[in-house]
Amino acid sequence: MTGSQSFAVALISGGLDSMVSAARAVEDGHRLLALSIDYNQRHQVELAAARRIAGLLGAERHVVLPMDLSAFGGSALTADIAVPKAGLGTGIPVTYVPARNTIFLSLALGWAEAAGARDIYVGVNALDYSGYPDCRPEFIAEFEKLAEIATKAGVEGAPFRIRAPLQDMTKADIVREAARLGLNAGVSWSCYDPAPGGVHCGLCDSCRLRAKGFAEAGLPDPTVYAPTP
């Protein structure tokens, strides 16, 4: 796929945020190229959700790219480190995957340049989140600058736009946006440590933020959580 600026590459993890972000790409009039990364994450079930989301959004192509970050470790999502379940704490949690969004956006950038796309959508936000440094507006702005000087397209005057439409939204805002877009939030997956039976654990940071978002939005939560001990 080359020569068309109507394409947009959207990173789709399988979670609610990336689902809404990709849906915004479609709403903005782009033809969707969906990219998911199989980084040997603990919660592999999210990739099945990513496939469902890409199909529902009518992606013209969905690439699930293998990149085994467990070879590096350093995170509860890629190594034998327990996922915290005591509630949202302070500081950067052990579920942070070293440089993950930098790696993922670099891969999306490579596909965007090859496909002739100029827009890359990513579902990061910096309000209700776990404190990851690569979800901040400063990171997105600097990566966009990097894309301009690191690519043939950028050097030749066709820069890339890193779209983070959820950047300033709370989780409740994102839940409401999913409803506005007519999305079935129940097909998305957020849990870092799936419980037996393939349901959300309800206790990890991601589950807590998801449940909080639905509660504060005043909308029904379609998520199936494991019974609380």
Image (tube, rainbow, N blue to C red):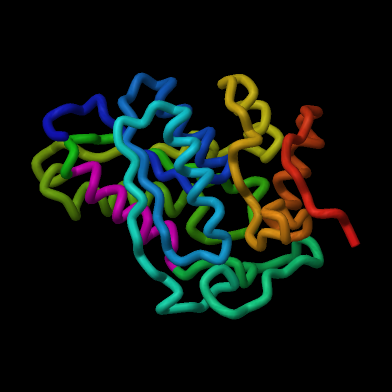
Q: What kind of secondary structure does the magenta stretch mostly adopt? A: helix
Q: Is residue 156 left or right of residue 112?
A: left
Q: In this view, does 216 lie to the left or right of 46?
A: right
Q: Residue at x 53, y 59 (%)?
A: 44
Q: Which residue is drawn at 58% across and 26% down?
A: 183
**179 shown above or below 38:** above
Q: Observer-nearest residue: 144 or 182?
A: 182
Counting from the top left corner in percent of width and height, residue 136 is at 51, 52
Q: Observer-nearest residue: 130 or 148?
A: 130
Q: Which residue is drawn at 61% across and 46% down?
A: 189
Counting from the top left corner in percent of width and height, residue 62 is at 34, 41
User: Is 91 in the magenta?
Assistant: no
Question: In the rendered image, is residue 84 in sight?
Answer: yes
Counting from the top left corner in percent of width and height, residue 205 is at 71, 58
Quarter where residue 170 is shown: top right
Question: Which span is picked out in magenta?
Answer: 99-113
Counting from the top left corner in percent of width and height, residue 82 is at 68, 75
Identify the image quadrant of the N terminus.
top left
Quarter where residue 214 is shown: top right
